């Protein structure tokens, strides 16, 4: 077994991760920018008065095609190459954005949103990131992309009302098309060509592991949870922008004054939750508290949506809980996933997330009556669904506090792999090992309070 002693990323890895993170950010901003401004715009489109439910469906429609195509796009990138598949996906996303920008009817915007979601490049970008980073830095690379997505969400929420005032929602759609095309330039001009393109079970879907992942009770609870979380988020934004203008709480052009401080403060409040969850090993407790914050927030929205101060407080509670869950859910998936199956577990998890966004749009669209303005009905239904999730999470086992690391191995056959597996498992702090000979990789789950990666590498040098 060989593996270089852990050190920082080299220049090419930093360049690759930075460029691929920017591609993710450009694409996700194209989706997030719409959230706080879409409902008020869409209700003024042709056909929205006759079919108001289409407003919610259009908001969440991208989630359906995103869920359907993200795993196939990842598999196609194995066959046809990472960059061509990513570029094709970004072109599809740009086409959908242009259709939505040019449409004057709710049906046209719905079509554009469906096409946007069809450019599902997330899995292919993750696979390219894995190709361009060494095993010991892959987790950090994925974490960098995750942080970028979180920041793009916060920035989008804050600046969307200002952009809407300057260029309108159709202009935002056009801007997302420009973002998509810019990301292709970044892909080909900045992102290096990988020397070796192969399958990485720690970051890509492996079809042979679907059964193992889908039969895993804790992972299924997380899949249901992220579906409900994004269902609630999308349904919330079917009605929240309308609440702010219908009750004369805040003109749309000034709504950034609400979103900006709330998002900043929610981010700050999230940090101690994450520290307690990880450092103090209280993940389940923090998990349950975060879901409860969402439930309380939705109840406050329902009973006090005529007060800007209560709305602001409810929004702060909601995004504190939401940000905490968005940061901790992928970590929980990684902890629960069997060794070597993390890529498949994350693939199923992401699919559930996108389906949740679609269901939330449909739910909000059908529940909300623009004549009755029954905002409270939507908020109470979201709170009830979150309550179901809280009960599901209550019976979730405490997660194992382990980290997944990947070692490069020189195993020539299964017998050699079994011997190295036994040697690794004999080390204190190594909880689980799966060796995939074809990838020349050993996927290990370790307790970092007992053994760290450098120590494991040093011990494993004798396993040849």
Image (cartoon, rainbow, N blue to C red):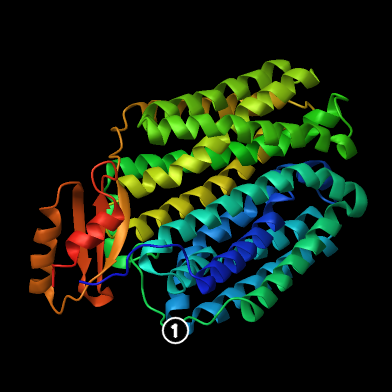
Q: Is residue 285 above or below residue 168?
A: above
Q: In which quarter of the image is residue 286?
A: top left
Asked which quadrant contains residue 37, the reply is top right
Residue found at x 60% / y 47%: 150
Residue 403 visible in rendering: yes
Q: Is residue 43 left or right of residue 377?
A: right
Q: Nearer the viewer, residue 443 or 234?
A: 443
Q: Nearer the viewer, residue 223 or 429?
A: 429
For the residue pair 392 and 198, the one nearer the viewer reads as 198
Query: Eyeballing the image, is 209 above or below 332?
Result: below
Q: Residue 167, how many percent across, how many down?
A: 90, 55
Is residue 405 positioned above or below 372 on the image? Answer: below
Could you tell me residue 138's position as x and y percent? 42, 62
Q: Position of residue 373 (x, y in %)?
A: 77, 27
Mark 1: few, some, or many residues within 10 Å (few <14, many ≥20)? few
Write the residue at 50% across / 70% down. 13
Residue that badge 1 annotates: 195
Q: Quadrant of the rendered structure where residue 90 is?
A: bottom right
Residue at image position (33%, 46%) is 335
Query: In what quadrant of the picture does the N terminus appear?
Result: bottom left
Q: Is residue 403 left or right of residue 309?
A: left
Give the structural element (helix, strand or loop) at label 1: loop
Name above or below for residue 15 compared with residue 377: below
> At x 84% / y 64%, what residue is drawn?
102
Total labels drawn:
1
Task: Tell me if I can see residue 49 in this picture.
Answer: no
């Amino acid at each position: 077994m060989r593996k270089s002693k852990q050190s920082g990323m080299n220049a090419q890895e930093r360049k690759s991760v930075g460029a691929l993170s920017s591609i993710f950010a450009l694409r996700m901003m194209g989706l997030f920018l719409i959230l706080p401004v879409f409902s008020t715009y869409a209700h003024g489109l042709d056909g929205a008065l006759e079919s108001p439910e289409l407003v919610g469906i259009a908001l969440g429609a991208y989630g359906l095609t995103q869920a359907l195509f993200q795993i196939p796009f990842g598999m196609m990138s194995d066959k046809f190459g990472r960059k061509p598949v990513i570029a094709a996906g970004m072109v599809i996303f740009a086409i959908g954005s242009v259709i939505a920008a040019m449409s004057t009817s709710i049906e046209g915007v719905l079509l554009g949103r469906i096409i946007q979601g069809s450019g599902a490049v997330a899995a292919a970008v993750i696979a390219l990131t894995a190709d361009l980073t060494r095993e010991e830095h892959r987790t950090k690379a994925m974490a960098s992309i995750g942080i970028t997505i979180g920041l793009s969400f916060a920035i989008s929420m804050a600046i969307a009302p200002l952009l809407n005032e300057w260029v309108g929602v159709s202009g935002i759609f056009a801007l997302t098309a420009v973002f998509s095309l810019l990301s292709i330039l970044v892909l080909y001009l900045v992102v290096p060509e990988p020397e070796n393109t192969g399958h990485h079970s720690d970051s890509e879907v492996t079809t042979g592991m679907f059964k193992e992942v889908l039969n895993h009770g804790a992972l299924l609870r997380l899949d249901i949870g992220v579906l409900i979380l994004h269902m609630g988020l999308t349904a919330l934004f079917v009605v929240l922008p309308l609440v702010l203008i219908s009750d004369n709480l805040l003109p749309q052009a000034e709504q950034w004054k609400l979103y900006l401080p709330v998002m900043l403060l929610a981010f700050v409040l999230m940090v101690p939750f994450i520290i307690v969850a990880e450092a103090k090993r209280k993940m389940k407790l923090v998990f349950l508290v975060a879901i409860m914050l969402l439930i309380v927030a939705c109840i406050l929205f329902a009973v006090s949506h005529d007060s800007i101060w209560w709305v602001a407080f409810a929004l702060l509670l909601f995004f504190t809980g939401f940000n905490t869950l968005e940061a901790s859910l992928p970590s929980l998936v990684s902890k629960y996933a069997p060794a070597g199956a993390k890529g498949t577990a994350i693939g199923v998890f992401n699919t559930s997330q996108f389906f949740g966004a679609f269901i939330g749009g449909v739910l909000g669209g059908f529940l909300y009556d623009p004549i009755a303005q029954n905002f409270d009905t939507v908020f109470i239904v979201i709170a009830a669904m979150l309550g179901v999730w809280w009960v599901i999470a209550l019976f979730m086992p405490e997660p194992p506090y382990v980290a997944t690391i990947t070692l490069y191995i020189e195993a020539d056959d299964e017998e050699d792999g079994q011997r190295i597996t036994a040697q690794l498992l004999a080390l204190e702090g190594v909880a689980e090992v799966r060796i995939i000979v074809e990838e020349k990789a050993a996927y290990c789950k370790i307790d970092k309070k007992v053994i760290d990666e450098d120590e494991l590498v040093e011990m494993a040098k004798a396993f040849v």
